[in-house]
Image (cartoon, rainbow, N blue to C red):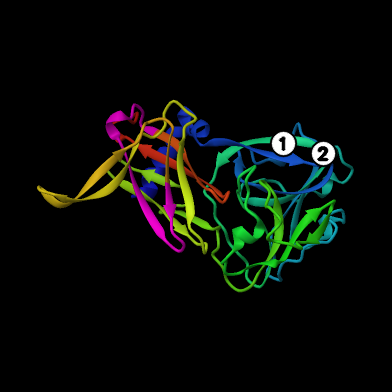
């Protein structure tokens, strides 16, 4: 039922264009002349590499599609990537090797090697995505994570208590070559940076604060229904968490947080609402080590003026982690019919 609702929502937004505006954010990536290892947090509106890198000094981009034989990172990115097993590579059209291009689409939530002909501040506009992670066990993984800039955690803080990823087997790109991380506790992570890290055994680690929704697309507040944002502290220390409602369109989601009310004369246990503004708002709280919390949200149908509303929840921690969650809401009686 929810999947069908989401399909209807997307169809409605495709006409109005409201979704593209409401769910977009800008990721800033500082490129240096030469090779860069970057993690794209947003999904570009146009996946064609010619469009994604058009107007930038990027002339080569590559991503790793791990073959079954296992991942092997190359010490020098400047070698012929086209001959390296598992790599998809895009070459700018004016290069003599452009005919070797094997990468025809660029997606978010992926790590890329990017070669730039000059320093460049890349402002990439795209759709915010909820973080997901698929680790390949007993091999190196080419990954990145959304973190604050400035204020990112150290590698040791971020991976503390993680089952699988090994910070003693982690490599960063330094001056065009992969270098082993020497001091995880003293080295801060960087926003938009990708790196190689070995995963020992299976893992589902997504960060110190794990943010889950029932659907991969985000929170879907269908008419008359609620949906939960589940937060799990996977670290060994308490976390200060902030949930912020980010609105970038004329039709953000007016929502309330549902809570249990105990001790009312008419009903021993009832459901109450904490009404949040239709526009921007934030809610902060502490989450003990190993603890979880479920925040049920419900859209306020009476305040919705369109058939479909959308906005974003930005979940941050004082440690410096960042997670974006798209929020969708529908009002069936306002849908246009043929």
Q: Is residue 289 magenta?
A: yes
Q: Position of residue 132 (x, y in %)?
A: 54, 55
Is residue 141 shown to the viewer in this render? Answer: yes
**Label 2 packing within 10 angstroms: few (<14), some (14-19), many (20+):** few
Q: Viewer-proximal residue, 158 or 25?
A: 158
Q: Which mark is residue 196?
A: none
Is residue 91 shown to the viewer in this render? Answer: no
Which quarter of the figure is the C terminus placed in? top left
**Label 1 packing within 10 angstroms: few (<14), some (14-19), many (20+):** some
Q: Is residue 57 above or below residue 147?
A: above
In the displayed structure image, the side of residue 277 where residue 319 appears, left or right: right
Q: Quadrant of residue 250?
A: top left
Q: Residue furthest right?
A: 96
Q: Is residue 263 above or below residue 308?
A: below
Q: Position of residue 243 (x, y in %)?
A: 45, 44
- Assess whether mark 2 and mark 1 are in contact (beta carbons under 8 angstroms): no
- The magenta-colored residue range is 285-308
Q: Position of residue 316 (x, y in %)?
A: 52, 46
Q: Residue furthest left?
A: 266
Q: Which residue is mark 2?
A: 93
Q: Position of residue 29 (x, y in %)?
A: 70, 40
Q: Which residue is mark 1?
A: 122
Q: Is residue 262 magenta?
A: no
Say what secondary structure mark 2 lies in.
loop
User: N-terminal of the two: label 1 or label 2?
Assistant: 2
Q: Residue at x 45, y 58 (%)?
A: 232
């Amino acid at each position: 039922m929810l999947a069908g609702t989401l399909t209807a929502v997307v169809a409605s937004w495709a006409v109005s264009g409201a979704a593209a505006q409401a769910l977009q954010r800008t990721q800033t990536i500082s490129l240096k002349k030469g090779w860069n290892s970057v993690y794209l947090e947003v999904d570009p509106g146009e996946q064609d590499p010619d469009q994604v890198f058009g107007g930038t000094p990027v002339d080569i981009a590559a991503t790793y599609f791990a073959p079954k034989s296992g991942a092997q990172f190359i010490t020098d990115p400047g070698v012929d990537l086209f001959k390296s097993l598992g790599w998809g590579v895009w070459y700018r059209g004016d290069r003599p090797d452009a005919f070797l291009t094997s990468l025809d689409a660029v997606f978010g939530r992926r790590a890329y090697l990017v070669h730039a002909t000059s320093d460049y501040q890349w402002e990439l506009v795209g759709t915010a995505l909820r973080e997901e992670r698929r680790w390949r066990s007993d091999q190196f993984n080419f990954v990145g994570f959304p973190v604050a800039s400035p204020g990112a955690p150290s590698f040791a803080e971020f991976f503390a208590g993680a089952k699988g990823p090994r910070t003693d087997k982690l490599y960063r790109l330094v001056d065009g070559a992969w270098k082993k991380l020497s001091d995880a506790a003293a080295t801060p992570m960087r926003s938009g940076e990708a790196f190689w890290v070995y995963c020992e055994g299976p893992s589902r680690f997504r960060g110190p604060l794990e943010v889950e929704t029932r659907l991969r697309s985000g929170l879907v507040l269908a008419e008359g229904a609620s949906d939960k944002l589940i937060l799990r502290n996977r670290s060994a220390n308490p976390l200060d968490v902030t949930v912020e409602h980010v609105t970038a369109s004329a039709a953000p989601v007016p929502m309330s947080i549902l809570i249990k009310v105990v001790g009312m004369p008419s009903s021993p246990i009832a459901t109450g609402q904490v009404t949040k503004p239709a526009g921007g708002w934030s809610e902060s709280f502490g989450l003990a080590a190993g603890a979880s919390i479920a925040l049920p949200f419900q859209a306020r149908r009476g305040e919705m003026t369109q058939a479909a509303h959308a906005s974003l929840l930005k979940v941050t921690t004082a440690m410096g982690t960042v997670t974006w969650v798209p929020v969708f809401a529908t009002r069936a009686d306002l849908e246009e019919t043929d």
